[in-house]
Amino acid sequence: MPTHRKLGKPTDARMAMLRQQVTDLIDLGRMETTITRAKEIAPLTEKMITLGKKKSLADYRQALSFMTREDVAKKLFDEIAPKYAERNGGYTRIYRLGPRRGDAAEIAIIELV
C-alpha cells in the first residue's frame, strides 16, 4: 500500500504544491482545500512544527529547504513552535465541509490547533 497519494500530478509538481500549501498553512494558521490534500499536508506540517521545537541551526536550515518563504520559517521558529512546546504531536485539525459546488470534490478546513 502506498504511503502517499499522487493527487493526479507528477512528483515534482506534487511536491511543489505541497510545499506551498504547508508554507501557507503555517503562515495563515488555517486554509480551505480538498480533503485528500489536507490529509497529505497534515503530516508535513507537523514535521515542520517538530523541527521548530528543536531550535537548532540544522533544523532551521532543514525547514528552510522545505518551505518556500524565509519569513514563514522565521515565524515558525519564533512564534508558532514555542506555542506547542508542551504538546507531543497533533498540531493540526481537519474539518470536513462537504462537496464543492463546481466539481463535487470533498472540501475541508485544515487548521493549526
Image (tube, grey):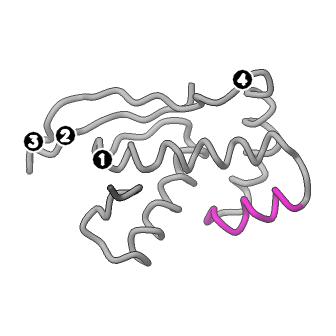
Point out which mark residue 87 bears: 4
For the residue carrying disc 2, how many other residues have a C-alpha within 10 Å: few (<14), some (14-19), or many (20+)? some
Q: Which residue is mark 2?
A: 106
Which of the marked residues, 2 or 3, is nearer the chain's N terminus?
Answer: 3
Q: Nearer the viewer, residue 22 or 58?
A: 58
Which residue, given by chain and number where applicable, does mark 3 sit on? 101
Tags 2 and 1 in contact by the CB under 8 Å rule? yes
Quarter where residue 29 is shown: top right
Identify which residue is drawn at 53% across, 45% down: 43
Which of pointers 2 and 3 indicates the residue nearer the eye?
2
Dot placed on the residue nearer the N-terminal end, 1 or 4: 1
Secondary structure type for disc 1: helix
Report which residue position mark 1 lands on.
Answer: 36
Magenta highlight on residue 50: no
Q: Residue at x 47, y 70 (%)?
A: 16
Distance from disc 4 to disc 3, alpha carbons, whole Å, reads 37 Å
Q: Residues within 10 Å of mark 4 (few under 14, many from 20)?
A: few
